[in-house]
Image (cartoon, rainbow, N blue to C red):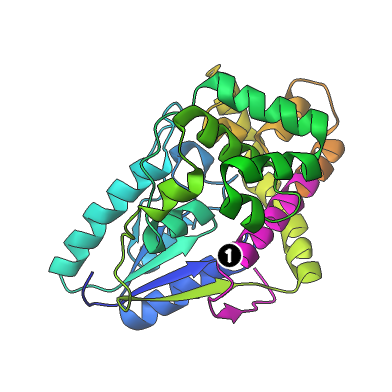
Amino acid sequence: MSSPLITLIAGPTASGKSRLALEMAERTGAVIINADSQQLYADLRVLSARPSLEDEARADHRLYGIADAAVAWSVGHWSRAVADLLGSLRAESRPALIVGGTGLYFSALTRGLADIPPVPAAAREEATALYDTEGETAFRLRLTTFDPPAAAAIAPGDRQRLTRAYAVARATDRSLSDWQASTTPMLEPGTYQKLVIEPDRAALYANCDRRVTEMVEQGALNEVRALSVRNLNPALPAMKAVGVREFASHLAGETTLDDAIEAARQATRNYAKRQLTWFRNQTADWPRHGLSTS
């Protein structure tokens, strides 16, 4: 891509990146583009902590609340939407701020998206069963036979990426590392600047806890109730959003509201921790900024 310069702002939930993006957009006139897989969904304004209507009125926001919960948006779907949007903005000479916490979206922008064929359920199940039976150390050694770079690079404890690499290799007869090496980044080097928001962990977790309380005050239970009555497939991305399962359990009479809130807080902290780990492992060369409040 050529100028205008694009700014990527990544970070975990409740880190303050949306506030920073809004401040930057008001100064520069940039368009804020969503890079959070949950904030895509119209049904999850509260649970995904989407920018408020007031904030959306202060700056131009795109790709927020554009999908129905019954539709599963993939990273490929998002990438195509962003490519079209960036093309339009470039024609208008408008800068863009791409903001969010979904690591794979930023990976697609800066490294490219591998066109990997769908992996059959049998391969995924084989990988999961082997990992659970053998444990991480033995499974990682097994993966070395199929994909040495992945076995060496994937962070300790990252069960999802380890089993994914194994399943891809088994299903396609080609390693995940090979697939990824043949990709082309969406953004050309030198056409964007990048930043990871990485607050102090204790402050981040406190922000997570406070955010859950605010979500309940803002109508999170009504959001979950509206989703529940639709009887959507629980495997859909929107149905796996943090807070949906916890508050649905309360609405079904299975837990108290206090217990649901505490469970949602724990789930949010766990999610933020996973995001921190991903960005530390995958964007180690990006500049860091610590924001202390959300």
Quadrant of the drawing holding the C terminus: bottom right
Residue name at image x 61 percent, y 34 percent? 240
Whether the magenta-drawn stretch holds residue 67 is answered as no
Quarter of the image for residue 101 reads: bottom right
Tell me if I can see residue 37 in this picture. Answer: no
Residue name at image x 57 percent, y 32 percent? 167
Question: 6 or 41, which lies in front?
Answer: 6
Residue name at image x 49 percent, y 28 percent? 171
Relative side of 14 to 117, left or right: right
Relative side of 130 to 70, left or right: right
* Image x and y of residue 115, in percent: 35, 41
- Among all residues in the image, which is located at the extreme left? 91
Tell me if I can see residue 291 in this picture. Answer: yes
Relative side of 165 to 152, left or right: left
Q: Residues within 10 Å of mark 1 (few under 14, many from 20)?
A: many
Quadrant of the drawing holding the N terminus: bottom left
Vertical placement of 91 versus 27: above or below? above
Residue name at image x 45 percent, y 59 percent? 106
Question: 62 or 82, which lies in front?
Answer: 82
Quarter of the image for residue 112 reads: bottom left
Which amino acid type is marked by label 1?
Answer: Gly
Q: Which residues are magenta?
A: 266-294
Question: 255 or 234, which lies in front?
Answer: 234
* Image x and y of residue 256, in percent: 86, 31
Vertical placement of 262 versus 197: above or below? above
Q: Which residue is mark 1?
A: 11
Whether the magenta-drawn stretch holds residue 286 is answered as yes
* Image x and y of residue 119, in percent: 48, 28
* Image x and y of residue 216, in percent: 70, 45
- Among all residues in the image, which is located at the extreme bottom? 27
